């Protein structure tokens, strides 16, 4: 994803990620996302499966409605602050952090739902920045609902960039086969070409290196995709590879980063899937996300890099077309929780090594 300057479904029989359930594990905040979408449903299902110590930020009333609609043997408890959470296996502790207190009409774009999703996320960010929770897992939000609420953010990453306390952030999409970091994100393709300058290339390559290390790869092999077909074919199909991308790769290598390319965008992910590369730097949104999503929406995870806390998210949207039907699959949310715990543990190990 573009680096951004900061302003300040049956479950039976499926292999689930190992996320742990001990109360000694670091607590995670799960934001409900858009309450008219599938967020409350997949969160309820994740708690029913055993997602470990988590606190929901959103609406206790909406979560109670979702639990009742699904017929789950869970209770919902409203808490004023995260320190009051008990992490009981049959209880969903919810910090009421928005103005919606019962389920809205499902599957519809609503300014109220957009504002509620934003408020819940800000509350969770505040808890993460103070260390009250170790990280945030975000259920999907709807960009049109945010806009209807008068909020000019294209998505989660931009909100996190504005309020998360980092100088810059980037998005890594990952599954168990490939990982990618985007140079540009939610913008028109015409603008993405303009924005993919030398500074954006360097930031993305550095984030790819840091993200790979955060996932436990000591010296990540970074492949940088070209912008044009065949990576420009030596300048026949465009000069960006020669004038911008290759110089950035050379500069990154001088910093000790194992970066290579530019590689043709239509084959580099195939090479990464075969084990040649650990992380691919993609130039624009669809170049990076299509390979990830093609392998399965239930397997992909969105990781925000650069924040002082961990943030992950499922790799799917609000799914308004199936909201309230009880068929939404929580697999990607469960995977996002597993990745969050993995990153938190790795971060703790790194911190212990630093002070020892």
Image (cartoon, rainbow, N blue to C red):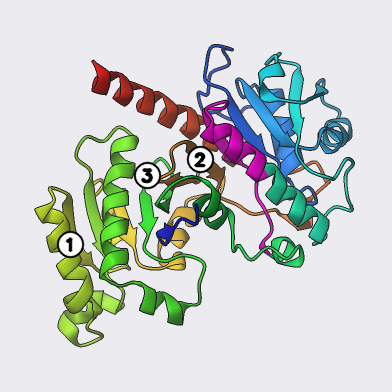
The x, y position of residue 200, in whole percent, is 32, 65
Marks 3 and 1, the one that precedes in the sequence:
3
Q: For numbered disc 2, what is the local secondary structure?
A: strand
The part of the chain drawn in magenta is 121-143
- Residue occupying the point 23% across, 15% down: 356
Q: Quadrant of the N terminus?
A: bottom left
Task: Name the quadrant containing residue 292.
Answer: bottom left
Give residue 311's mark: 2
- Could you give the CA–CA distance between mark 1 and mark 2, rounded to whole angstroms? 27 Å
- Residue occupying the point 37% across, 55% down: 181
Instruction: Tell me: 142 left or right of 185.
Output: right
The x, y position of residue 142, in whole percent, is 69, 58
- Could you give the CA–CA distance between mark 3 and mark 1, rounded to whole angstroms? 23 Å
The residue lying toward the viewer, choosing from 189 and 294, is 189
The residue lying toward the viewer, choosing from 209 and 163, is 163
Q: Residue 122 lies in magenta, yes or no? A: yes
- Residue occupying the point 17% across, 77% down: 242
Mark 2 residue crowding within 10 angstroms, few (<14) / some (14–19) / many (20+): many
Mark 1 residue crowding within 10 angstroms, few (<14) / some (14–19) / many (20+): many
- Could you give the CA–CA distance between mark 3 and mark 2, rounded to whole angstroms? 20 Å
The x, y position of residue 203, in whole percent, is 30, 58
- Frontmost of labels 3 and 1 is 1
The residue lying toward the viewer, choosing from 352 and 166, is 166
The residue wearing badge 1 is 249
Instruction: Tell me: 285 left or right of 116.
Output: left
């Amino acid at each position: 994803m573009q680096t951004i300057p900061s302003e300040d479904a049956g479950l039976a029989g499926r292999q689930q990620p190992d996320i742990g359930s001990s109360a000694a594990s670091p607590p995670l905040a799960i934001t409900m996302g858009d309450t008219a979408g599938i967020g409350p449903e997949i969160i309820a299902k994740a708690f029913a499966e055993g997602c470990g110590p988590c606190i929901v930020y959103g609406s206790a009333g909406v979560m109670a409605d979702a639990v009742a609609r699904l017929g789950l043997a869970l209770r919902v408890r409203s808490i004023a602050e995260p320190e009051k959470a008990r992490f009981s296996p049959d209880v969903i502790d919810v910090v009421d952090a928005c103005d919606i207190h019962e389920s809205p009409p499902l599957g519809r774009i609503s300014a109220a739902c957009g504002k509620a999703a934003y408020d819940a996320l800000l509350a969770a960010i505040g808890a993460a920045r103070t260390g009250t929770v170790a990280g945030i897992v975000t259920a999907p939000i709807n960009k049109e609902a945010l806009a209807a609420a008068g909020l000019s953010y294209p998505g989660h990453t931009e909100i996190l960039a504005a309020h998360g306390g980092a100088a810059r952030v980037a998005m890594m999409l990952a599954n168990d086969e490939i990982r990618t970091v985007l140079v540009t994100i939610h913008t028109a393709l015409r603008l993405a070409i303009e924005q993919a300058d030398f500074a954006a290339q360097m930031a993305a390559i550095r984030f790819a290196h840091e993200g790979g290390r955060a996932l436990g790869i000591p010296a990540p092999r970074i492949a940088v995709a070209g912008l044009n077909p065949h990576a420009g074919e030596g300048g026949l199909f465009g000069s960006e590879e020669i004038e911008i991308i290759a110089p950035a790769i050379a500069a990154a290598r001088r910093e000790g980063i194992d970066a290579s390319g530019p590689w043709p965008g239509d084959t580099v992910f195939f090479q990464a899937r075969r084990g040649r590369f650990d992380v691919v730097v993609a130039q624009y949104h669809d170049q990076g996300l299509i390979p990830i999503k093609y392998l399965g929406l239930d397997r992909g995870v969105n990781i925000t890099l650069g924040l002082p806390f961990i943030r992950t998210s499922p790799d799917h949207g609000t799914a308004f077309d199936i909201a309230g039907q009880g068929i939404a699959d929580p697999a990607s949310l469960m995977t996002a929780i597993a990745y969050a715990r993995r990153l938190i543990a790795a971060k703790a190990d790194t911190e212990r090594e630093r002070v020892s």
